[in-house]
Each structure stands twice: as C-alpha cells, then as structure tokens.
Image (cartoon, rainbow, N blue to C red):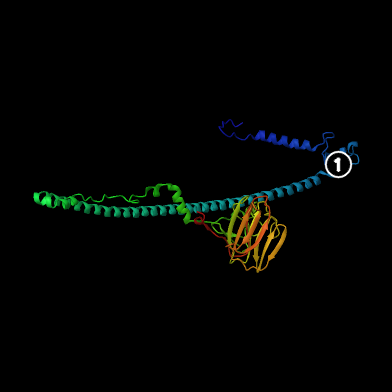
Amino acid sequence: MCRQISANTPSLNLALGNVCQAFLHHKRHLEELCKVHQKKRTLVCCVDEQLVCEICGQSEEHRNHTYRPVQEVVEEHKGVLRSEIDHLKENMELMQQADFEGDLLALKMNYDAADLENRIKAGFKDIHQLLDDEEKAMFNELKLEKKEKLESLKIKNEMISEEIQMLTNTIKDLEKELNSGDIRIIQKFKDTLVRAQCKPEDPEMAPGDLIDIAKYVGNFNHNVWQKIRRSISYTPVVLDPNTANFHLTLSVDPTSVWNPNKSEVINEQSNNNIERFADCPCVLGYVGYSTGKHTWDVDVEENTSWMVGVAVESVQRKGTNGLPSGIWCIGHDGEVLSVTDPLESRVPLHGFAKPTVVRVNLDLSAGRLSFSDLLGETVYHTFTHNFTEKVFPFFYTKCHFPLTILPKSFNKEI
C-alpha cells in the first residue's frame, strides 16, 4: 500500500488490521447467538451449565430447569477469578519473601563459610608454628650435641698432642744415649731399654663420641608428630552447631555452650533445619557412638540449670513440650540434683553436693551409662540400658554461665 521496502519491521497494514478487528467483533457477536434460533443467549441453565436463549429455555430439552441471567453468572465468575488471582498474588509474595529470606540465608552461609575458612587458616597456622618450633628445637639440640662432641674431641686431641710431645722428648733422649759412649751405653742399658719400650696409650673413641644420627632422622615423621602430640590437648566431644537451639550460644571451638536468655527473632527458614532442636534449649555432640567405651568431662560449676547425658539419634527435635523423649541424663536446677530417662520422670538424687565437674562414662558394650565426679570417687547414678541405635552426647542449659567440655592431653595416652 505504501510502496516501501522494509528490511526488519514492516509498516502496519491498517486496512488488514481493520478487517481483523471487524472479523473478531463479528465472531464474538456470532458466539452470543443461539445456533438453533439465532437469538442472543441471555440465560445460563443451572442444570446443564449451558448458555441458552429464551426460546431454548422453553423447549422440552430444558423442561423444569432453572436459569440465571448471563450477567449475574459472569459477575459471580469474575468474583471467583478475582479471589483466585488474589490468592495467587499472596502465594507469589510468599515465594518472593522466601526468596528474599533465601538470599539472606545464602549471605549468612557465605559469611559463615568465610569465617570458617579464616578459622581453618588460623588452625593450620598454629600447626605450622608448632612444626617451626619443633624444627628450631631439633636444630638447637643438634647444635648443642655437636658442640659437646667437639669439646670432647678437642680434649682428646690435646691429650694426643701431649703424648706425641712426650714421645718426641723420649726419642731425643734415646738418640743422645746412643752417642754417649760404649761404657755408658752398657751401664745404663737396662734403664734406657725400659724407657725405649714405654708405649703410649692408643687414643680410643668412646661410645657416644659421634653424632647420634638415628636419633634425628630415624622414624622422623613419627617422632616429630609424637613430640607435637604431647604438647597439644583435645576435647573428646565437640558440639554440633547445626543441632543447637537458637536460644543457645556456642564458643568458636565449639566446646562450650550457654543460654544468654535473650529474646531474639528466629529465622523460620533456618529453624526448619531438621537437625536443630526447635523448642528445647539443648545441643548434641558432633560424633555419635554405636560401640565401645567413651568418657568426657563437663565443667558445670557456675551453671545453675543444666543437664548432661546422651540422646538417641532419633530423638524428637520439633514440637516438643519440655524435655524430648530418648534422653538419659543427670541435671541440676536450683538446689536439686536429679536424673531422667525416657521411661521415668525426673528422679531427685539426695545426699550429694552440687557437682563442679561431671564425668560421663558410656560403655555401650556393657549397656551402662554412669555419672561421677572427675576422679570417679563419687558415682551419682548409673543407668543400665541396651542401646539399639547410635547415641550422641547431650547438653541442656537455661543458664547464662557456660557448660564446658574439659580438654584432655595426648601425653597421658602415650
């Protein structure tokens, strides 16, 4: 129509557009008409849910049916659709909020990961420092041994020098005797012969005169590790932050836990972690046990409301009212020392002073769990139970003073 060439977007064909609009308008008009009677369909059959004209409404097919005006049904349908649209918008807002919280959680995870990387680097830096210190100590030891051995060799060299000087003097004296005349040689022969037959002591190397090479390079890696191992301590139990209730605070190690008793807004998405205790202010140890004997000591001296013991792996972590089932523990609240297991309520223990340190002894082979003081002289209570699933160290606190797992030294085990 315009006689122009277009490389990309053609010009609008207004004539064709008008024809299309006219066709759509005519099509909508045809859709409104009854195909049988060519009358406008103004009613909706409530039985068949069909659009009908007034003539169809009086036919035998729709005898005794009820009808509603099209406009009334349309408004009702629009209301339903608007309600569904609002519901979809609400879901979209929730998803956007969840996406936002997910972004926040991702940021927190990135921060935690970065913080964790820094801790790992610091840990390896400490290990490198231990190795550097051990290297310096070994070089100092070698330097001292070398100095001592050289001093010893110097003394022996001086003694050899003195012996050589004595032999030199003896040889000179004997050579003079040879030129002293025949009579003198005969007269002093025996004495001269004794002096000539005097043998100096041969210098001998005593044991330990040489550098002790095997001490430094024999089993080098093992010996260095054993020395470093004696200088460090470890905790037999570390806490699992992923199981800790949000009201609790853990140390960086993590070997201590306390309850600041502060009201904080909880991130529901993070709280949905299936490992975390949602209601009970407790935390589990990171490693669970199925066999063997295990012991750990907990400093409870300043804490006034605590429980320590073990929990089965399947312990309930959500929707609990009070202490969850599946826990065997000893605890102190106020002035009362008591024990708790899944089959009984809390049982008071009388006749004991408040502990400062509680030693937990777990013997899974014998099916025995006992609580005592640090030296094992006072046993507060012993449970006997055949544990059929993995158990984890359990810690509970409502106090702002920490529960701390005490370290042990490798030196006692070597």
66 and 278: which is toward the camera = 278
Q: Is residue 218 visible?
A: yes
Mark 1, secondary structure of its residue: loop
Q: Is 402 above or below relative to 314?
A: below
Q: Position of residue 343 (x, y in %)?
A: 72, 57
Q: Position of residue 251 (x, y in %)?
A: 55, 59
Q: Is residue 279 visible?
A: no
Per the image, the residue denoted by label 1 is 47
Q: Is residue 212 left or right of residue 70?
A: left
Quarter of the view holding residue 281? bottom right
Q: Is 69 above or below relative to 413?
A: above
Mark 1 closeness class: few <14, some 14–19, many ≥20 residues within 10 Å: few
Q: Is residue 175 left or right of residue 335?
A: left
Q: Is residue 206 left or right of residue 276?
A: left
Q: Is 180 above or below relative to 249?
A: above
83 and 383: which is toward the camera = 383
Q: Quadrant of the N terminus?
A: top right
Q: Position of residue 331 (x, y in %)?
A: 65, 63
Q: Position of residue 166 (x, y in %)?
A: 19, 53
Q: Mark 1: which amino acid?
A: Val
Q: Is 39 above or below relative to 155?
A: above
299 and 184: which is toward the camera = 184
In the rendered picture of this protein, how many numbered marks are placed on residues?
A: 1
208 and 89: which is toward the camera = 208
Quarter of the view holding residue 308? bottom right
